[in-house]
Image (spheres, rainbow, N blue to C red):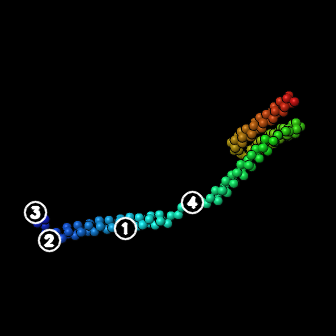
Amino acid sequence: MSDIEELSDEQRISLLENKVGKNRTVITIVALTLIIILSVSITVLILKLLHVDEPYVSNSSFEQQALLILQLQTDIVEHKQLISALTLTYEKSQVAAFQQNLIEQEQSYQRFLAALKVGMFDLAKMIQGSRTWLDVYNDKLDDASNLSRQREQNLQRLSATKVLLD
């Protein structure tokens, strides 16, 4: 108590004002908290009182979905029966003609690549400093030509084994 007696009247008043300000702040926070809790409680109570036990989706939509599922299942069964009835038969002459057509296309593609390579070489001779791009494109053309030759060989091998099987 001796500390309080040593304080002047002005100091005592400022201490009391600080305590009163802090008390007001605490009381305001408590009051706001109580108001929020009360409003949330009332809102929840009103929602519970107004709650209706109806489902969000009507039963008729479930019935429609069930009918649709049944229809789709029957369609699947019908399509499976149709697929099982399908047979893939080819005439031997059709397959051979198709293979021959593919072989001719590969050969034509190889001739085109060779002509393109010659044309690029002639163009490179006309333009100075074109050796670098010519090498790059020659490599790409060689790769494409090699792939075409491999496809042609595979097709010829298939047609040869087909002839042996017949």
Q: CA distance from mark 4 to mark 2?
A: 72 Å
Q: Residue at x 23, y 67 (%)?
A: 19
Question: Which of disc 4 and disc 3 is earlier in sequence?
Answer: 3
Name the one closer to the observer, 141 or 25: 25
Query: Which one is in front in this view, the residue at disc 4 or the one at disc 2?
Result: 4
Residue 71 in the image, given as x and y percentages of width and height: 72, 52
Q: Label 4, on which residue?
A: 55
Q: Nearer the viewer, mark 1 or mark 4?
A: 4
Q: Which residue is mark 1?
A: 35
In the image, residue 23 sits, relative to residue 106, either above or below, namely below
Between the C-alphas of marks 3 and 4, the distance is 74 Å
Distance between mark 3 and mark 1 Cα atoms: 43 Å
Question: Please, what secondary structure does the residue beneath circle 3 have?
Answer: helix
Identify the residue shown where x is 78% and y is 43%. Answer: 81
> Residue 68, percent across and down?
69, 54
Q: Nearer the viewer, mark 2 or mark 1?
A: 1
Amino acid beneath label 3: Ser
Circle 3 residues within 10 Å: few <14, some 14–19, many ≥20: few
Q: Where does label 3 land, which residue?
A: 2
The residue that appears at 69% across and 43% down in the rendered structure is 133
User: Mark 2 to mark 1: distance in Å?
Assistant: 39 Å
Q: Amino acid at mark 2?
A: Asp
Q: Report the amino acid beneath label 4.
A: Pro
- In the rendered structure, are the residues bearing label 2 and label 1 in contact, judged by CB atoms less than 8 Å apart? no
Q: Amino acid at mark 1?
A: Ile
Labelled disc at residue 9: 2
